[in-house]
Image (cartoon, rainbow, N blue to C red):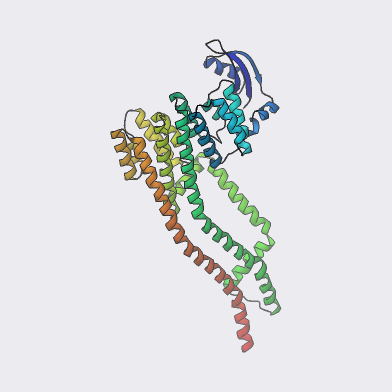
Amino acid sequence: MPVFAYEATDKAGQKVSSQIEADSKEIAVRELKGQGYWVTTLTEVTTEKKKKAGGGFGLFKRVGLKDLSIFCRQFATMINAGVSLVRCLDVLEQQSTNVNLKEIIRDIQFEVEGGATLSRSMAKYPRVFSNLAVGLVRAGEVGGVLDETLERLAAFMESDMELRRKVKSAMTYPVIVVFIALGIVIFLVTFILPKFAALFKELGVTEFPLPTRILMATSHFITSKWWLCILIVLALFAALNRLKRTKTGKRYYDTIKLKVPVFGKLNHKIAIARFARTLSTLLSSGVPILQAMETVAGTVDNDIIADAILLSRASIREGETIGEPLEQSKMFPPMVVQMITIGEETGQLDSMLSKVADFYESEVEATLSSLTAALEPVLIVVLGFMVGFIAISMFLPLTAVISQLSK
């Protein structure tokens, strides 16, 4: 979308200069008039200027949660100390070690100096600052408690980062074992088995047992059509990725994530923990309940659970409770619904949601520990079976040859 630099006069007669994204100059002027500005000059920003301000390709850059949490924590500390917003951004831009984040902070500083709000400037980078982050900053700006909301945002990111770290840590061992198993199997099939096949040919063996025939056919296919194997794998990944981007495909994928044996319950608990933690953070920061529910629906990363949250949002708009639609969706356990209902009745919904998040995060940790303990022997047995099958298939013809020679 084109970016236009403008100079305008606000209702108080003060001159304002900043940038705005719009499909055309006419739309940009209309939007600025709607904000109460009288536009004097409007020019499209060149590619060189966009890059200088951190725009352009910066819109598509990603920044890790660790860098963002440090950014929010330092930002909150300086705001609390009374440092001006522009000065905070200048210091953060100088101290940031992430090149992408440095460019983004520079652009946000440029926008804020031109009169734009911090939340609106951050909203230009949806792949870096989520709806949750923008919503919390906007609530902090309106309520005059920007330092508190930034502290809550940093705490939320740190909690989310810790949860992800636990999941990755628990899955590291199984993933390593799977890759080692695949490596061993591919090595045996592509390097060792062809040598045995050549030996069988020298010995004049023409008839092979079924396991040996299956293994030799697999070995021949992999060694002669290895490029086709790679193409098939890449095609499957591309097809799955494309399917996930469609609305119907995403719903099927999210349904499978919740229904798949063993991992389905884990994914469900992670989604519930994220829902509770996000909604608690938004409500405790003063974000209106309807806006908070809409933001939460976009952060749970599961369309099935998001639909249940949006139904609950519609129920609130009509003056009803949150709990009943969540219960009817069958996506939220009775304990969660009861805690939310009690929180509504007592006016302590954010506190109750925080307790729900703590409980489910501990449940996720316990599930990961038990899952890792259960997967270890299963993977070892599977690996042993695969290697054993290959070894037996290779030695079966040799036993037949030895038995013939002994006669």
Pick the front one: 87 or 373: 87
User: Furthest-front residue in view?
Assistant: 81
Residue 357 percent coordinates (x, y): 39, 43
Q: Quadrant of residue 277?
A: top left
Image position of 249 with respect to 35: above or below: below
Q: Which residue is found at the position 59% from the left and 22% from the top? A: 113
Q: Which residue is found at the position 58% from the left and 70% from the top? A: 390
Q: Quadrant of the N terminus?
A: top right
Image position of 79 with respect to 269: above or below: above
Pick the front one: 34 or 10: 10
Q: Quadrant of the C terminus?
A: bottom right
Q: Quadrant of residue 43?
A: top right
- Residue 123 visible? The answer is no
Q: How many marks?
A: 0
Residue 193 percent coordinates (x, y): 65, 70
User: Furthest-bottom residue in view?
Assistant: 407
Q: Is residue 147 left or right of residue 1?
A: left
Q: Which residue is found at the position 44% from the left and 54% from the top? A: 368
Q: Which residue is found at the position 62% from the left and 21% from the top? A: 24
Residue 258 percent coordinates (x, y): 43, 48
- Residue 165 visible? The answer is yes
Image position of 357 with respect to 75: above or below: below
Residue 206 percent coordinates (x, y): 66, 76
Pick the front one: 160 or 186: 160
